[in-house]
Image (tube, rainbow, N blue to C red):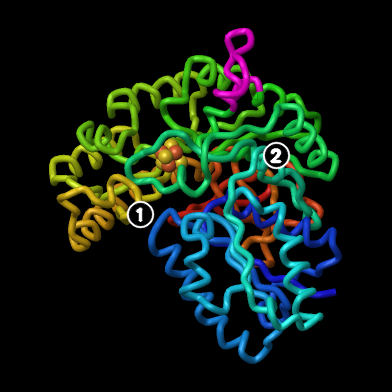
Amino acid sequence: MPSVHIKTYGCQMNERDSEQVAKMLGERGYRMTGVEADADVILLNTCSVRDMAEQKAIGKMGMLRKLRKERPHLVLGYLGCMAQARGESLTKTSTHVDLVVGTQKFHRVADYVDDLLRRRIEARMDDERLPIVDVDEEEGSQSTIREQELTAGQCTAFVSIMQGCNMHCAFCIVPQTRGEERARIIEDIVAEVRGLADRGVREVTLLGQIVNLYGRHEFPKTGGLSPFVQLLEAVCGVEGIERVRFTSPHPIGFRADLIAAFGRLPKLVEHVHLPLQSGSNRILKIMRRGYTSAAFVDLVGKLRAERPGIAITTDIIVGFPGETDEDYAATRSLVDQVGFDNAFVFRYSPRQNTPAATMGEQVSEDVKEWRNKDLLEVVNRYVARHLDALVGQNVGILCEGASRNNSERLSGRTRTNKIVVFAGAPRLIGRLFDVRIARASSSTLYGEVV
Ligand code: SF4
């Protein structure tokens, strides 16, 4: 059977979508390969969040032109966010591309690949090189990302619970690439989680572009609980699942019922990734984020009061249009005030057809670079402080497998999402136990099994 190589760019949602595509292709008899040169079909699952991610995928497809010349039967395709945003134009700029499939059509990829390979075999010269482009919307497509192949010993898994976002933050292309918010029903999600638990998964991460506002348009509140908290309760109730995470939420979606959930659902881990974006109220308003810096700090305080020791991580954009030195100073001071466990700092990157892209007062690349470097120094001080505080302590981890940098060692994560590397036998994979932390590097804890 033909073999397929999928290369994924961007976020965990994309990783999850690629897994689903791989599963569907596998069911048709395709063989997945990690080696590009062996593949009969190469698919790039793309990201549009930053210009650099798009350029990487376009550059990669450019390099594949040579492979295609050597092997004329090779099928090449773009999937996902950039495919959705750019559509047919991708087949004009890259004339060797056969397939462009948007974010609501992942479940059609196997059909299209079948079709393209059949055309090659039948050598129907009239349509052999006609590309297939499908970036239409499709009702119910959010419920098609629901199965995955697990690797041996896999004990963590991502579960896609919704697609799309209705928030329209001024810098963000996601509402264009992923469409309106659409939620899967709770019963389907719980059935997927149950199936994962039966196959050895101990930790699930619920995924959505605005995950904590899950189902707000489709499902009612029950007993004062939002659909998302109802879902959390249901997933925490699945036997065999020991840890539940979610990403990425929006600060405005943390209402009283969700904050209280951290106090009463023990399987919900002590970690929230809470995107701040800016510490300046003026910039937050232009970004259309819907909260102030004081409301953000207040929310962090409530989460810490409800679950002492909870880790808070964040995303921050520096160099948003119009960001002055004072605005940046407000962000820097908020980072100091909160003392995040970690933060992803991004230089603002204009995205086509977003309001921020055409705003005046674009910040120069030099200033963005300086602020990025400066903020990372502040962030890293707090990262080190949080890691150092665990040295000498016993921490509970879920052992996920071999360490990425040293296959002789094992690696796991704490409930606060910190990586721990230690020596141990492979039989520990998939188990929860304590490790005594001996030392910390800039990003990793090292210790010994207790
Ligand atoms: S809430 Fe998140 S995904 Fe939605 S528009 Fe804002 S940044 Fe983009």
**Relative to 61, is 204 on the left or the right?**
right
* Residue 200 falls in image quadrant: top right
Answer yes or no: is residue 439 visible. Answer: yes
For the stretch drawn in magenta, what is the main secondary structure?
A: loop
Amino acid type, mark 2: Ser
Q: Residue at x 25, y 40 (%)?
A: 331
Residue holding disc 2: 143
Image coordinates of residue 72 in percent, x first then y, are: 68, 87
Q: Tell me the distance, in whole angstroms, between the alpha carbons under discs 2 and 1.
A: 28 Å
Amino acid type, mark 1: Arg
Is residue 216 on the magenta stretch? yes
* Residue 207 falls in image quadrant: top right
Q: Residues within 10 Å of mark 1 (few under 14, many from 20)?
A: some
In the rendered structure, which segment of residues is drawn in magenta? Answer: 215-230
Image coordinates of residue 143 in percent, x first then y, are: 70, 39
Q: Residue at x 84, y 62 (%)?
A: 28
Figure check: 116 above or below 434: below
